[in-house]
Image: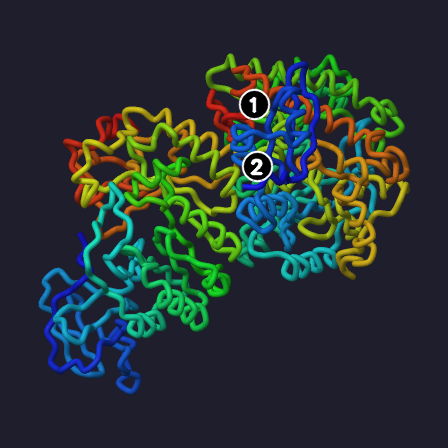
Amino acid sequence: MIRLTIDAKYSFEIKKSFAAKIVDIKNYNSKEISNVSIIKNEKKLKKLISYFGEIVITDESADFEIDEVLLFYKDAKKIRRFFRPRANANAILLTEQCDQRCIMCSQPPKNKRYDDFPLFNEAILLCPKNAVLTITGGEPTLLIEDLLNFLIFANEKRPDIFFHILSNGQHFTKEHLNQLSIISESVLWGIPLYSHDSKEHDNIVSKDGAYERLFISFDLLLQAGSRVELRTVLMRQNIKSLVNLAELINHQLPWIEIWALMQMEYIGYAKMNWHKIFYDNSEDFSFLQNSIIYSLSNRINLYLYNFPLCTVPKKFRSIAKPSISDWKKKFIDKCEGCKKTNICAGFFEWHKNEIGYKNIGKEYL
Amino acid sequence: MNHNLFPYNFEKINSKYYLVTSLAGDFFFCNEQNLQKLLNKNIDENFSNFLISKNFLFGSEGDFYWNNFKYKILKRKILPKTIGYYMIVPTLRCNLNCSYCQVSRVDENTKGYDWDDEILKNFFNFVKKNSLSSIKVEFQGGEPTLRIDIIEKIINWCEQEKIDAEFAICTNLINFNKDIEKVVANEKVHISTSIDGSHDIQNKQRADDKERTSQFFKNFDYISNKYGIEKISALPTFYNFDQIKPTIDFYYSLGLRTIYLRPVNFQGFARKKHPESKTQINTWNEYYFEALNYIFENNYKNKNSFIMEFAFATNLRRVFQKGSNGHLDIRNPNFAGRDNYIIDFDGKLYPSDEARMISRIGLVDLSMGDIVNGPEKEKINNYNWNQISDVNPDCIHCSFQPYCGIDSVDDISRYNRIDLPKHKTSFCNNHISKFRDIFSRIVSNDPVNIFNLTGHLTNIFTLNPPFSKIIYD
C-alpha cells in the first residue's frame, strides 16, 4: 500500500500552510527557487530543500516523484501527497461528514473535515498539465458553496484540469445552476443511484426522500449540461431489479455519460453488513448479463468497476475497468502467474478471500 | 402530475398490437382498446405510470420529463461539427467492367482520371482546416489500388500529423502485389470487397475471366489467413434474387461476419443495363425479409458463427440507439458539408457517393465546390433545406419518423425531382417496410428474433432482450 501522508521534521517554523512541487535537482537553478519549489536531492530521498529551509523525511518508505505536488500543514508534522503524476488516481478527501448512511459505505462518516480551499487553490496551480483530480468524502457537496467557488477558480486559472467528484447529489439547488454550467465541461459528477424504486434506494442510503431529492438534482444537472457518471454498487438488495434501473436510465436519464456497476469494498459498513449484502457475481452473472445487454443495446455507456476479470464472462471483459486506485489495490495468491493483471481491477487491499468470490483464479479466465 | 402527452404517432403492427412512438423515439405496443384510451386521454393511474416510465407524459413545460424529451430529440438529430469521414476517389480507372457499375468507371488505360499532386496537397490542407485529430478515410474508385501510391501518401501523412485515422480500401482484389500488401499490412487499414457468390457467380457477374476470378479468391484467402478475417468485409450485389440464399451460405463458409443485402443500385451503368432496379423495391424486400429470416435461423442454430446483416443492423440501431447518426443512407437531418465529404477524381466535393454518381451521368450537378476552392456554401445551404424530414408533410405523420432518414439524391435519381409525395418514393416504401419488419420482430417475443435483435445491436448474440416491458395490456 502506498502511503499518502509522510512523516517529516522541519528545520524552520511554518507560519502558514503551503503547497509546493518537487523539481529535479539536475534542472535546479538557485535563482529559480521559490516557495513552490522543493528539490529532490537524492535518489532515495531523505531531505527536501525548500524556500523556507530544509525538511527531513523521517518516513522510511517515502519516495517522491518529480512534479509531485505536496501540502505542508502549519501545525502537523506530516506532509500530504496532493498530486502524484504516476498514480492512476489522485483524490482530495474534503470531509468525512455525510448526510446519508449507505449500508455498504466503505468510509463511514466521521465528524472530521479537511477542507482548506485557499491551500487547494495554491496546490492546483502547481499540478501538471491535464491533471485529473478526484474530490471525495464523506459528502463533498455539504460544502457546496466553497466547493463550487473552488471549481470556478480552477476552471478560470487551469481549464486543463479535470475533476471527478463523488457526491450523493442531495445538495444542488436552482441557485447553483449558473455555476454548474460554467464548470460543466471540466467536472464529471459521480453520483450513486441504487434502484429504480424510490423505497429501495432510500432504504439502501438510509434516508427518506433521498431518491426524490436526487431527481431534483438530476434535472438541474441536465439543465446545466453537467457530465454525470451514475454509480450503482451491486448488492443482494438491488441485483434482482437491476434491469429495471437500466430501463429507467434509458428512458429518464439518457444523458448520463457513464453508468458504473460497482463491486463492494470489504471495509466500513460493508464489512459489518457483508453477509447480508455481498453479491457474488462469480457464481451467478445472469442478472448482470441481462442489464448489460439491455444497456449496450440502448447505447448506455456501461462499465464494470472493481470486478476481477476472472469473475466476468469473457464476452463482457472489455467493459470491466481497472478501477481500483493503485494505493489500495492488491492481487492475491490465486493471481500468481496470471497474465492479465495489467488490465485487471484486482482487489482492494482489505479484501478477504474466505468471504469473497467463490470462482476466481486463472482457471476461470 | 398533470397528464400532458408529448407528440406521438401510432401504427398497426399486427392483428393484435399497435405501435405507439413518441417524437423523441421512445415506443411501446398496446391493443386497440388501450389505444382508444390514449387517444381519448382516458388514462388511469396504471397507464399513467407506464407512460411516465416510457417518457410519454409530462407535468408542465420545462419540468424533468420535458427536459429529458428535449434532450432525446436533440440527440437523435445532432450531427458532428467537424468532418470525420472522407470518401476519396484517387482514380476513376478500373480493371473490371461490371454491368451494374454505379460510378460509370473508365478504362484502366485512360488518361486524366486520377488525383494529381495539386489535389493531394489541397486535400491535406482541407483536413487540417476542417477535421479534428480523428478521421476515417474510405478509398473508392474506379479501382483505388491502381493508385496505391496516393493511398500510401495519405496514410503516411496522417501518421506524420498524428491524426488518429482508420482507412478502408474498397477494392476488387484482382491484383494484390507487394506494394499493395505493404499498405494493407498496416493495422489501421481495412479491405472492403465485393463477393457476389461462389466462383461461378463471382466470375459471371464480375471479372468474366476464370483466371482473374481464381486470382481474386486466392488473394482473399491469402489476406484472411495472414491478417484475420476481420481485416476484410465484403458485400454482394444481386440481380438474380434466387441467388441470395446460396450467397449467404457462401458467406458463412468464408467466415465473414457481416453481409449487406441490397439490390442493384439504380445508378451509373445499371440505369441502362438494369432498368428494373428503378422500381423493384417491393419485390426486392420480399426476398430480403426471407433472406433475413434465413440468416436469423442460421445464427440461432449455429453456436459459434454469426452473420450480421448490415442494413438491418443500421436501421435497428436507429430505433434503439439515440445518436446513431453516422450513416448517410439513413439519418435526419442529412445535411451536406457537415461531417463528411466525397472527393472525386477531379477534386470535386459531393455530399454522398450517390450524388457523385448522378452528377457523373449528367442528370444534375450535385457537386458542392471542389478541394482547391473549397465548399460552395450557398449551394450546400439550398440543398440542406430539403434534407430535413421534420418539415415534410408526409414524414411528420409517420410513426417511424424519429428513426428514419431522408435522401433527396435517391428521389432525384429515380424521379428527376424531389417534391414527389414521400409515400410514392422508393426510399419511403423501402424504409416503411423495413421498420414494420423490425417492430413486428420486437413485439413477436420469438427467441430467434430476440437472439438476433440483441446480436445486431451489440455484436453479442444471446437470448437477453434489448428491451424490458414494451407491451401495455
Q: Nearer the viewer, residue A196 or B154?
A: A196
In the displayed structure, would residue B12 be above or below residue A350? above
Q: Secondary structure at mark 1?
A: strand
Q: Position of residue B165 (x, y in %)?
A: 56, 49
Q: Position of residue B10 (x, y in %)?
A: 69, 28
Q: Nearer the viewer, residue B50 or A233?
A: B50
Q: Position of residue B322 (x, y in %)?
A: 58, 40
Q: Chain of mark 2?
A: B
**Quadrant housing the N terminus of chain B:** top right
Q: Judge the density around disc 1: few (<14), some (14-19), many (≥20) Cα neighbours within 10 Å.
A: some
Residue B84 visible, this angle: yes
User: At x 50% / y 20%, what residue is drawn?
Assistant: B305
Q: Position of residue A232 (x, y in %)?
A: 36, 40
**Tags 2 and 1 in contact by the CB under 8 Å rule?**
no
Numbered circle sitting on residue B365: none
Question: How was the colour assigned to the protein in this rendering?
Answer: rainbow
Q: Nearer the viewer, residue B86 or A152?
A: A152
Left or right of B45: which side holds A130? left
Q: Which residue is mark 2?
A: B321
User: At x 28% / y 83%, what residue is drawn?
Assistant: A34
Q: Secondary structure at mark 2?
A: loop
User: At x 85% / y 43%, what residue is drawn?
Assistant: B359
Question: Residue A362 is drawn in which quadrant?
Answer: top left
As measured in the structure, the alpha-carbon distance from the residue carrying label 2 to the one carrying label 1 is 20 Å
